[in-house]
Amino acid sequence: MIDYQFIKANTAAEALKILADKNNVKIIAGGTDVLVELHKESRDLEMIDYLLDISGIEELKEIKIAEDKVEIGSLVTHSRLLKNKFFAENIPFLTAAAKDIGSTQIRNRGTVGGNVCNASPAADLFAPLLALESEVVLRSQKGKRNLKITDFIKGPYKTHIRNDELLEKVVFKIPAGEYYCNFQKIGRRKALNISRLCLAFLTVIEDGVIKKAHLVPGAATPYPTPFKKIDDYLEGKLLAEIDPAETGKMAADAMVEITGERWSTPYKRPALSKLAERALSCVKEEAGYDG
Amino acid sequence: MMDKVNVELTVNGEKYEVEVTAKERLLDTLRKQLKLTGTKEGCSVGECGACTVIVDDKAVNSCMVLTAQVDGSKIITVEGLESKRGLHPLQKAFIDNQAVQCGFCTPGMLMSALALLNENPDPSKEEIKTALEGNLCRCTGYQQIIDAVEAAAAEWGN
Amino acid sequence: MAFEYVNKGVKRVDAYEKVTGKAKFGADLEFADMVYAKVLRSEYPHAEIKAIDVSKAEKMPGVEGVYTADDIPNNLFGVIVQDQQVLAKDRVVLAGDGVAMVAAETEEQAAEALKKIEVEYKELPGIFDPVDARAEGVQKLHENKEDNQVIHHPLRKGDVKNGFEKADIILEREYKTQFIEHSYIEPEAVVAVPEDQNHLISIYGSIQNPYATRTAVAVVLNTNLSKVRVIQNHIGGSFGGKDEVVSAMAARAAVMALDLKKPVKMVNSREESITESYKRHPYQLKYKVGATKDGKLTAMEIEAVADSGGYACQTPFVTWRSVVQATGPYELENVKTDVYGYYTNNPYTGAMRGYGSPQVIFAQESLVDELAKELDISPLELRLKNIYRQNSITASGQKLDTHTVSLEEVIKKAVEKSNYKEKYLEYSKEQKGDIKKGIGLAVSFRGCSLGAEAIDAAASLIQINKDGSVAVYSGLAENGQGLKTIFSQITAEVLGITMKNIDYMEIDTTFTPDSGSTVASRATLVGGNSIKDAAQKLRATIDAFCADKFDLDLDDVDIREGFIYDGKGNRLATFEDIVGEMGNQGIMLSAYGWYKGPAISWDEEKGTGNPYFTYVYGCQIAEVEVDTGTGELSVTNMTAAHDVGRAINPANVKGQVYGGVVMGLGYGIMEEVEVNKGKIKNTNLDEYLIPTIKDMPEIEPIIVENPDPVGPFGAKSIGEPTLELGSAAIANAVAQASGRRIRSLPLNLERVLIGRALHKGGK
């Protein structure tokens, strides 16, 4: 039976004290995951003694944009992310990913921190955040630590957050110079979708040469993982000479290397290949190499 | 151990002090404690939108919120639409455009539409669809609901 | 003919309460001393129940009573075959069968107590494919039956052997359809109130068919029909779905309410609803068609196998509609059709909007397109060579001569509006890029109302009060489709009063005679005629009174919008004054209306006769964009032309078209109850996907009106025809766009991209 005490924290400091003092605490922010677990009477909730509500902590609701760096407070909702003009203009693949999460009602409650901490294989924000080489800032009463988001994820629905820690924000550097990004998604319907597959691609170009490339599929592997092999392949090459279809096939192979042949592979292999191809084609076109 | 939490809510302009359990959803408080049964339960997992209400100007699924979380909030439910002056333009538009069939999704649809028009009085068709994408309807095929929201928006402009 | 109210898009009479939140649905009801009940359901699709221990549950806090099959006076019920258990006694035949139930002070307490019930099962091997169920020597799922066959409907016309010999081309194809959930947004809810108003028990709730529910409850309680009162509340959608499953729920609640002498409320969660409710029948269909090289059909041979799941439910009638309509609206000299239904250990299947037609239409309309391709004739041309026209003879030998056979008109209107011909040519050319467009059409004829399934009659009651206000009762139910509004319009039209004077009453089995079920798109046609009958009786009385009072010829009495006029248009009195006066003189101003459909016939052995007294015709055209890189499918446009006889309320008819088209789209491209070894995997709306507002195509409804000699003001049907055509039209459009013919529903990502479905755990 699920039986817990509800505690509301109004400041991050209050929340950290509770996390330090008490055991078996679960954090609730927007509630769009926790309430589903509650309805389904999940085992995880049976183990907790306290539900810590952080949804009222104003200091975690900020988006800070500095010259070279972005900080997204963990309680920023998907709706706010979506409305942010800077992202729409400069990091549009993040906006594109946020746009398709759940529905308006879900985006009004669901938070960036919740999406990251839930670590669902199909969580749409992961792909662009990984491509941006984001870090998470975790705070406890003992101090703070920064973890690369790739190191933060332990597995499907599992992260390396410690019991006394609160995810404070997600930070990433704004790509410099000439860069392009793209987000692709396949769903079974046109709204209220869980990604069947998605993919984020970010590349930095210098004199036509790919300086940096990050191709990150979502819902393709047990948990979001950058496809380093593809990145390595792309880096150093002339963008104009990249064959998107060929690269797409390589990305699909890379996926199957990780997952093995699964029941869904006959579909996901050609589909992921196509998403990667499209992302690369879009970027090439945007860079003026096609058309 | 399940403790009770005292919560103050302003619902449709009226203040309520309620005692809720730590598991009580806003949907339960509205329906069971305040007897505002216009808000409907269809799936309990944030998917169908029948329980949509407005919390602090935002449309949310009331099945996805613990009442204890929204202490001090301003809430609007379907019961808050009609006033002494009569039906709200959205309600009139839903009637005039045959946007109602079985009526079970209607309260949630109205709330999503209201949140939209409050924020964006002149929405495009695509914006209307986005605002209502979290409200499932099995009867109408949605067309006459879109017509109604467009008509209400036009009325809003005047 | 000019009308005041009929043929007008008047506002719905039940809209006000629905937009204000005042409309009470089943889950909104409260009664003094009410308790809440929950059902424990089997996880096994097939198992023997060895023992049930409820002792721990009985001791749980708040528990008022724990019940098993032993507590049910009569445990079997069913509209057609009485094989459905209220609670499973010795054996569960499907995953979701109720085995025990608990009533407690709160819903949470009832749910907690359920967890303490210990059931000892012995799992039995299950049958999960109806084709396996028909094998010889296979285990019988219902012991008192000879085998697992629920029903077999044969139809024989001419000589198919001969017909195939005349053919230049013979095509054999197999098609498959899936389990579908009704997905009414309101999960089922009932309240049973004991000793209520001189009845043994009253049942309130989301009930599609109050009389069927009344019968089920009376049968289960072993009592008279008059002891059971069923009152329908506002119902949050049904689509054929809130029948047997709600009857079972009502019977359970009634048993507990009578034992506890307290009102018992039961409300399903979405998971409970999807787990326990019946689905649309999946069909496996084999079609063989012969045609001459210029496209004239010579013979058709069909075998369709329907999965009935654990119970017979509506399978005998659902499959009957299939056998009547299986060839589609095409003239054929030689037909051999066999439609079967078999018991399996899958979820049981029953009525759902369309009722045995969407499956055969998907097959037959796909087949016609496949044949057109083989013959190198356009799909439109091939159809026009073979469709039913005035005086055509159907597969069962019925001559279509009593109504306007408007199929060609309907097709032409849809073709013109959608620009089908040009688009078909354009999309037939090589298309660049991954996104390919296609256009496809599907046509149908559909028998209106029940046909030879059952007696087709309905009643209504109209009472005129002395102040001129009017109460209307009908034995058919408002399920969201707009019946209250349609019936109010007919009443106003006949009586010559305004809609404002009319109060439409909730259906209550106490007040109106049994009118059968609100199914088969029969409400407007059959129920509307009974309303018209009652109103005409009253009108005749009033006319006679006025003729006498004002010294007029009977024919000169005119009543319009609440005023009495003479033949020259002079206003003589108000309706209120006249009926007030009549009341004071002791003239009765209440009337029952009754309507029984014209005679029909069916020979069950040969499959011959006149199964329906009239038909409707429809054509839908789908335009799609197929992403051949990802399998994503976008239905961009749907044109839907339907002959409705006469639209009593055109705005309402359009609502039916929009809703049916979108439901048909869901059936065609995304919906599927995933059943693995009898267990449903997707039990909520996050996994069972129905179309959202963003999936809706541009829909162009075309209302075609050829008044029917039988229908009220010429009206026929619209509810079901709108949904039955979409999947076939879409599949045909997808085949044109992608070159891939998909013969299984739904046309999901995998089927569109790689031609087959993939299932978790599958190979």
Image (tube, coloured by chain):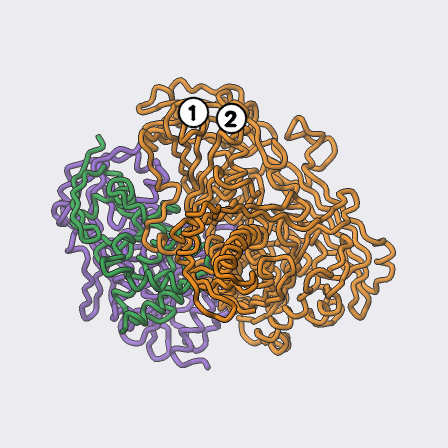
Chain colours: A purple, B green, C orange
- List the residue tagged with mark 2: C221
Q: Circle 1 marks a residue in which chain?
A: C
Q: Secondary structure at mark 1?
A: helix
**Image marks 2 and 1: residues in contact by CB distance under 8 Å:** yes
From this viewpoint, is residue C524 visible? yes
Question: Which residue type carries mark 1?
Answer: Leu
The quadrant in which residue B152 appears is bottom left
- List the residue tagged with mark 1: C258
Q: Residues within 10 Å of mark 2 (few under 14, many from 20)?
A: many
- Who comes first in sequence, dot 2 or dot 1? 2
Give the side of residue B79 with respect to residue C522, left or right: left
Q: Is residue A93 shown above or below C457?
A: below
Q: Looking at this rendering, what residue extends furthest in the top direction?
A: C55
Q: Is residue B72 shown above or below A134?
A: above
Q: Residues within 10 Å of mark 1 (few under 14, many from 20)?
A: some
Q: Position of residue A166 (x, y in %)?
A: 20, 48
Q: How many marks?
A: 2
Which quarter of the rendering shows the N terminus of chain C? bottom right
Q: Position of residue A194 (x, y in %)?
A: 41, 54
Q: Which residue is at the front of the view, C565 or A143?
A: C565
Q: Circle 2 marks a residue in which chain?
A: C
Picture residue at 59% right of the left edge, 36% below the top? C79
Question: Which residue type carries mark 2?
Answer: Leu
Q: Which residue is at the front of the view, A108 or C84?
A: C84
The quadrant in which residue C684 appears is top left
How far apart are the two marked residues, 2 and 1, measured between alpha carbons? 10 Å
Q: Secondary structure at mark 2?
A: helix
